[in-house]
Amino acid sequence: MGSPAEDLIKKAARDLANSHHAIALTGAGISTESGIPDFRGPSGVWTKNPEAERRAYRSYERFLEDPAGWWEERLTSPGVLGDLGSFQPNRGHYALVELEQLGALKCVITQNVDGLHEKAGTRNLLEYHGSTLKLRCTSCGSRFRREEFDLDRLMRDKQLPPHCGRCGGIVKTDGVAFGEPIPSDVARRSLEEARKCDVMLICGTSAVVYPFANLPRTAKQRGAAAVAATIIEVNAEPTPLTQEGISDYLIQGKTGQILPRMVEEVKGLRAKS
Ligand code: NAD
């Protein structure tokens, strides 16, 4: 008999290997081992600086009132998470890529805005809260790589905010601010995935930010005809999903250690079958 976590890792590997449509949901916890702090963990940005949280809640309102001033502020002061373009994926991100390549995971829906799943190579990816490495038109929803705009020149020439080359609308970062609606394309596709999945692997999220936190509930409460999805959490600590019995089981620990072990187990099961 192995340790409780080892037994649960094996159980999760069996659930993934036997699934028809498994998906993963991720949050800031999967990126802490890349050096990016989370918000609500013991060393989280909000935990250590509640005033930064209060300021963040006002950010979208400020963008609507004064897009040029909002952009200038962003370009001249460091973001709460630092320069996200400089971080690299860790073993947790790569494990999800391997699960996708093994066919044991069909989609990753992330709340993270750091672009690390894309950098690691996940192919079917939904960035629920957008990506700070991209920009998005607030009118037509078109997305652009950040490099497509010379933001510093626009600031020097007093031409902020940037405008969309397709429709002329105002462009902001793709990262979804508090109070900003989730872009409709990602919201719709994420809901479809949550309704369709038979296994949901939730990694490194406190699951308190809505509407993202509704996705596990949707998977759990599928219509009477469908069997509820099996919901697995991998997290450093229990969450409301654990406490409310939304997740079937919690594997407590670090995603960078647990997910690679899960990959080994799935490979072992595949080799046997
Ligand atoms: P959160 O900060 O609310 O919760 C993170 C959870 O992960 C906590 O329960 C913490 O204990 C756990 N955790 C931390 N390190 C872990 C590890 N190595 N292994 C397993 N678990 C670990 O994060 P959230 O639920 O994603 O909500 C925060 C919101 O802020 C999100 O919407 C996200 O957009 C944004 N955010 C993004 C980033 C990023 O892009 N990297 C970082 C911070 C916040």
Image (cartoon, rainbow, N blue to C red):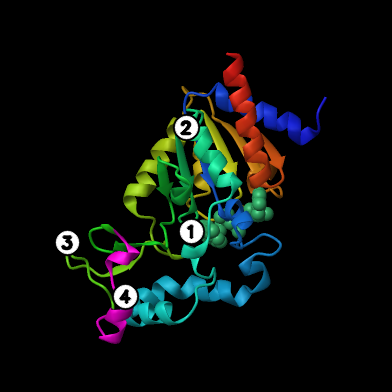
Of the numbered discs 4 and 3, the one sitting upstream in the chain is: 4
Type of amino acid under label 1: Asp
Disc 1 versus disc 2: nearer the observer:
2
Number of numbered discs visible in the structure rendering: 4
Q: Which residue is mark 2?
A: 101
Looking at the image, which residue is at 64% across and 46% down? 256
Could you tell me how far apart the alpha carbons at marks 1 and 4 are, in whole angstroms? 19 Å
Which range of residues does the magenta coloring cover?
144-159
Q: Is residue 106 above or below residue 152?
A: above
Tell me if label 4 and label 3 are in contact, CB under 8 Å.
Answer: no
Q: Rate crowding at label 1 as few (under 14), some (14 to 19) or many (20 or more) other CA atoms within 10 Å.
A: many
Q: Is residue 66 above or below residue 195?
A: below
Q: Is residue 254 above or below residue 228?
A: below
Q: Which residue is mark 3?
A: 166
Type of amino acid under label 2: Gln
How far from the left and from the top, in percent, is residue 76?
43, 82
Side of 137 where 266 appears, left or right: right
Of the numbered discs 1 and 4, the one sitting upstream in the chain is: 1
Type of amino acid under label 3: Arg
Residue 154 covered by magenta stretch? yes
